[in-house]
Every structure is written in structure tokens, then in C-alpha cells.
Amino acid sequence: MTARAGEEALGFDPGDRSFAGVAAIGRIRSAWRAGDCPRNLRQARERGGGHARLEIDAPYRPGLAGLAEGQWIWLLAWYGDRRRDLIVQAPAHAEGPRGTFALRSPVRPNPVALQLVRITTLDAETGRLEIDATDAFDGTPLLDIKPWLDTVDRPPGP
């Protein structure tokens, strides 16, 4: 991959230094493909959401108990096909390089994506949840779902 001015690589692949195994609980399904994907959830919503849905594997479906249509949930997804060694990036939308941890880029040492989405349809029996939007490619591995809790997730202050 061609580096942009100011970018800096680690000199090693963080994937070679992994210490924890993760298991996908299902997949994110969408209309998005490489070359035709919004850069973020705001753009995804502006483009109609991408026919976004989650397909939860059978063993994990009991974990959907307690979720409801209309509820906001956090998704953790694995963007493992992305570069992992870039620690300073030069995004096309920004002036100058920035540290990876100051960006929402999927290019990072641990390519875990975080999305806050709303459940629009829920069928726990089949493990299918329709969500308002995603900026993930079709087939992206889903690692976890967590509920948005206003008393926990809302930043403090006025």
C-alpha cells in the first residue's frame, strides 16, 4: 500500500503479537461493498442505511433475550482484512497526519469497529435483527452486541 506523506508504520504486524482469541457471533449484512461504502454511520444513514441487518449464529441467539425493537445497541465488529501496522495516518479528509487513536479509521492495530445503531426489527428465534444503518461491508464478522444504557453511556455534564 502506498503511504501518504506523514504516515508512519509500526515496523511489525500487531496480529503476530495477539494474546486473545475472539469468536464471531454472527455477521453484519449490508448493501455495501469495496468501492461503494460510506465512510461512517452518518453517511450510511444519509444513503438509506445500506439495508443493514445482523444475522446471529444459532448458539448465540438466546443472548438476544431482553433486547427490543427501537432500542439502541453498540456493535463490535472485526475489520480484520485491513492494514494493522499504521500508527500515524494521513487521512484525505484532514489537514496533516494524525495518530491512529485520534481517528475512526478501520486501519488500526486491532481492527475492531464500534457502531451505535438502532434495532428496527428483531426476530430472536431466527437471529435476524434489522438495524437503522451500518458502514460495514456485507459479511463483516460481528463480535459482540451491547445495549446503550443512558445511565452508563451518556457522558457526564450539562
Image (spheres, rainbow, N blue to C red):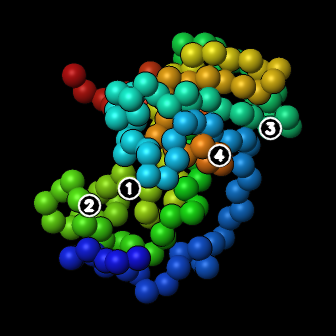
Mark 2 and mark 3 lie on one chain; the one further toward the N terminus is 3
Can residue 148 be seen here? The reply is no
Q: Secondary structure at mark 3?
A: loop
Mark 1 and mark 3 lie on one chain; the one further toward the N terminus is 3
Residue at figure coordinates x 34%, y 27% from the top left:
46
Residue at figure coordinates x 15%, y 65% from the top left:
96
Q: Are marks 1 and 2 in contact (CB under 8 Å)?
A: yes
Mark 3 and mark 4 lie on one chain; the one further toward the N terminus is 3
CA–CA distance between discs 1 and 3? 27 Å
Taking 13 as reference, is 36 above or below it?
Answer: above
* Residue to which mark 1 is pinned: 105
* Residue to which mark 4 is pinned: 139
CA–CA distance between discs 2 and 4? 25 Å
Which label number is shown at residue 91? Answer: 2
Q: Residue 52 location in percent, x, y? A: 56, 30
* Residue to which mark 3 is pinned: 57
Taking 91 as reference, is 14 above or below it?
Answer: below
Along the line of sight, which residue is nearer the eye, 89 or 136?
A: 136
